[in-house]
Amino acid sequence: MTAQLPALQVIIPLLCAPFCVLLRSRTIAWLLFLAAAAGSLACAVVLAEQVSDGEVLSYSMGGWRAPYGIEYVISGFNTPVLLLVSTIAVIVAVYSRRSLAAEVDSKRIPLLYACFCLNLAGLLGIVATGDAFNAFVFLEIASLSSYALIAMGRRRRALLAAFQYLVVGSIGAIFILIGIGLAYGVTGTLNMADLAQRLPEIYGNRALSASVIFVFVGLAIKMAVFPLHSWLPDAYAEAPSAVSTFLAATSTKVAIYIFLRFAFTVFGATLVFGTLTLDRIGLLLACLAMVIGSGAACFQSDLKYLLAWSSVAQIGYIVAGFSLVTASGLEAAYLHVINHAVIKAALFGAAGLLLLRLGSVRLTDLAGFGRTMPWTFAAIVLAGLGLVGIPLTAGFVSKWALAMALIEDGQGLVLAVMLVSSLLALVYVGRVVEIGWFREPSPVIAASAVTATSATSRSSTAERLPRSMTVATWTLVLLSLYFGIDATLPATLAESAATALLGSGG
Amino acid sequence: MSWSHYAYYLIVALMMIGLYTVISHGNLLKKLIGLNLFQVSVFMLYIGLGAVEEGSAPIIKDGVETYSHPLPHVLILTAIVVGIATTALGLALVVRIFEAYGTLEEDEVITRDAAEHDGVAA
Amino acid sequence: MSTFVLMNVSLFAILIATALAITRLRALYEATMLTALFSLVSASLFVLLDAVDVAFTEAAVGVGISTVLFLGVLALTRSREAVTPRHRLWPAGFVVLLAGGTLIYAVQDLPSFGAADTPVQAHPVTETYLEESQHDIGIPNTVTSVLASYRGYDTLGELVVIFTAGVAVLMLLAHAPRPREHLVHRELILADYRIVRVISKILMPFILVFAFYVLFHGDYGPGGGFQAGVIFASGFVLYALVFGLDGARQVLPQSVLLWLIPLGVLLYVGVGVANMLLGGAFLDYNSLNPGDPEVGQHAGILLVETAIGITVAAVMAAVFFSFAGRRLSR
């Protein structure tokens, strides 16, 4: 049975989606999503165990061997992402039940869970596949389901956010399609390993260089690398809380993974970073993203927008890490992928709790909530410190690793920009703390918050927060603290990922 | 620029007309139309890659030696389906946006949102 | 200049002219119809380039379903576009120059158009798909064998994409406010016209039979589950146009559609899971009949094509009904 695990990893969530539609019960759909997430987590754990000694698993779909059929490849470079996505999915599944019930029309919930399952299957499929075109197909599954999920937000703005993401995301997808097509035209193959083998012979081919550019611009849109980030703030801020939590932690991270997979194991680092100097471009964009993302976050008037802009900056850190093209840089990038996913999921989760209780996450409406909701406030502060990178938080570990990698490579300027961005992070996290703890709740807003709460949910639930949601949020917060104190697990995963990427013909 | 690549240059021209329509137009429906044009032109690129001038359709028959390559056809069948799926979802969003805002122009939608934001609290 | 080149160039000329007209037109009905024309001409181009399956699908989707959906949405919204503000043109022009420049640069190093010795043709998969498939799978239409067997997993992905779109559209549009009675009765019913009514009734069975033909004939000629599903759905679109949405809903109730949409995906994944249980890899149809793999392949391909047909037909019909139902309720 273990031989079938690479396929089961994706098939389990894929199979749960049609059942959600077929049975159309809110509880059953939720259970199905929980089962899908738990099932894929179990597969990911066993797979990670199997490849921990550097082995590479290959699974031929349909029994057709690699360049003729589609293969799944499981190795050190993708197990961390599989683990990350499925773990976050389990936690979000726990969180989502009460959160969605409060934010989304109850008739839509079973279908929404179907979209959640599809999104999970799509993301896992992108990570597991060893075929370039198959990656495109699963990218579309993940993208289409996320457009639909985002559109379910409470405000009408969510519809526009989803539409804009759809247009920009589709342009990105078509760019990737063009890129894959050009590479196919000059090699005749779509299998990643086969491509990697055939490409070095034709380095210098103009179609190949353009193929690299198109694939990477397309993926940069999905990764929300500055200046192609414009879809992200609206999409994450307007989506229902459970959706923001899931997407913020997973979708850009998966795009980053597939970017690395293409760069290091398909096109090859010598072409991508050597000839086409994507490393220098990457560092430049990373610096801009770090400063502008954090800077914009400081000026937001809505907590979810603030968090979304901070994601733009945090993606900058990750881009800076892998743009160094060194083992330590890649390790730092992977580490920050994991840590930032956990931290940002915790923060969006906490924002969802506020939204449930106060009916709004505009900063002016949050005045004084630190005294009325001390636990949620504490969660935001603890996870927020991780964003800044205070010692003993997960954010510190990965930023430290990144700083070391930058020093090793002699990139003092980037290091300085990183410090500025961290200071800005201190400003925006500090602003939330100041508003939440030191400001008096204005009586008008407090009153309107109460009416908003009783309007959106039953007054009995307004007093106590649903336990499932607090548990899920706190699990993420504690996980981020744990990774700050004992970073063995993420560090081992990141190290084996970096080795696997650089080892396979980089 | 060699003559033997004429079709690719024409395909690139088509793609760019599509891309220009998506980005420049503010009307949401027109954006989707542009996206369609862009997509269909990319399909031509793929089909062009597999085509052989003297070949025939890849349905095996006795007495036929050269066939065009079936793989690009398969890929594009998949891509067409992805395209219609995106269009359908985009159109559903357009309908909802029109019901919520009463307009299909992106700029107007944003202005109306900003007005709401400045006025009564959301 | 050979006729091949001449025909290609003239088709491209029509396409470019159409595309330019589409960008310039501010009347969206006209732009939609021209988009349908664009699809039709590109389908002709695909025929010329030997991609008959693709041409069939592009004709069914681009000219058929996609146009119908656009028209349905235009009926719900506004059909005139505002003047594009100047500030939008410059960034668009800039992006297009960059992307177009890169592409022009790129295609110079692509192999010659229509050549027989390109890397695509020289790669070993060509031989597998064109020759060994005759022995391994035994189906003349190699597009079908690559689609449903060699790259059957991609096709599952494609089916899941259309399933996702169906779920998403239903989620966005299904819960419309209740229809107002007096508006429903004012709807123009084409069924009042005898010729339309009789002809569409005569056509209906032929459309459905043709859909089945396309589904089962996909092994030997252009066609397959996806095209069949679209044709099947278009039969119901015609029915809904003539007899009204309520009439179509009586023939094909929403509850049935909601049952059929996931059914196809379940059937497809079910085949794969069955292969796993029989000891093969996911979607390894050989495991269905280990004694004679060719029989297993035939059975597997037929099952997954049927699965595609079911979900595609149901999703297309459901999407159309959702748009059409929206109008009645406004």
Image: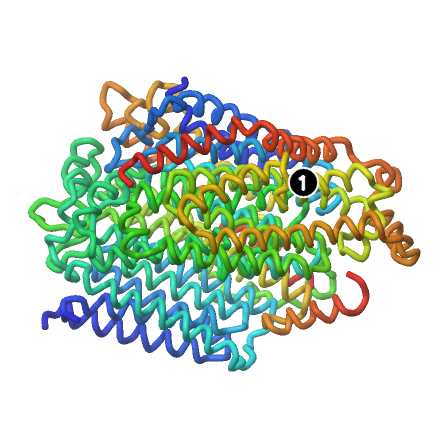
By what rule are the colours in the image chosen? rainbow
* Residue C218 x, y percent position in the rendering: 29, 44
- The answer to whether residue C158 is visible is no
Q: Left of C119 or right of it: where is C95?
A: right
Position of the C terminus of chain A by quadrant: top left
Q: Nearer the viewer, residue A351 or A294?
A: A294
| The N terminus of chain A lies in quadrant | top left
When asked about the image quadrant of residue A349, the answer is top right
Q: Which residue is at the front of the view, C278 or A329?
A: A329
Query: x, y percentage for residue A22?
Result: 58, 35
| Residue pointed to by mark 1 | A383
Residue toward you, C316 or A366: A366
Residue A479 lies in quadrant: top right
Residue depicted at 34% across the width and 24% down the height = A55
Which of the two residues, A61 or C98, is positioned nearer the viewer here?
C98
Three-letter amino acid code of the residue under disc 1? Ala
> Is A248 left or right of C143, judged from the image as shown?
right
Residue at 68 percent across and 45 percent down: it is A241
Q: Secondary structure at mark 1?
A: helix
Tell me where residue A313 appears, x and y as whole percent: 56, 53
Judge left or right: residue C288 versus residue A224: left
Q: How many marks?
A: 1
Residue at figure coordinates x 70%, y 39% from the top left? A382
**In the rendered image, is residue B63 in sight?**
yes
Up the image or down, A389 lies above or below C76; here it is: above
Tell me: residue B99, above or below residue C222. below
The quarter of the picture where residue C258 lies is top right
Residue at figure coordinates x 80%, y 62% from the top left:
B121
Count residues near mark 1 (Cα–Cα under 10 Å), then give few for <14, some for 14-19, many for 20+.
Answer: many
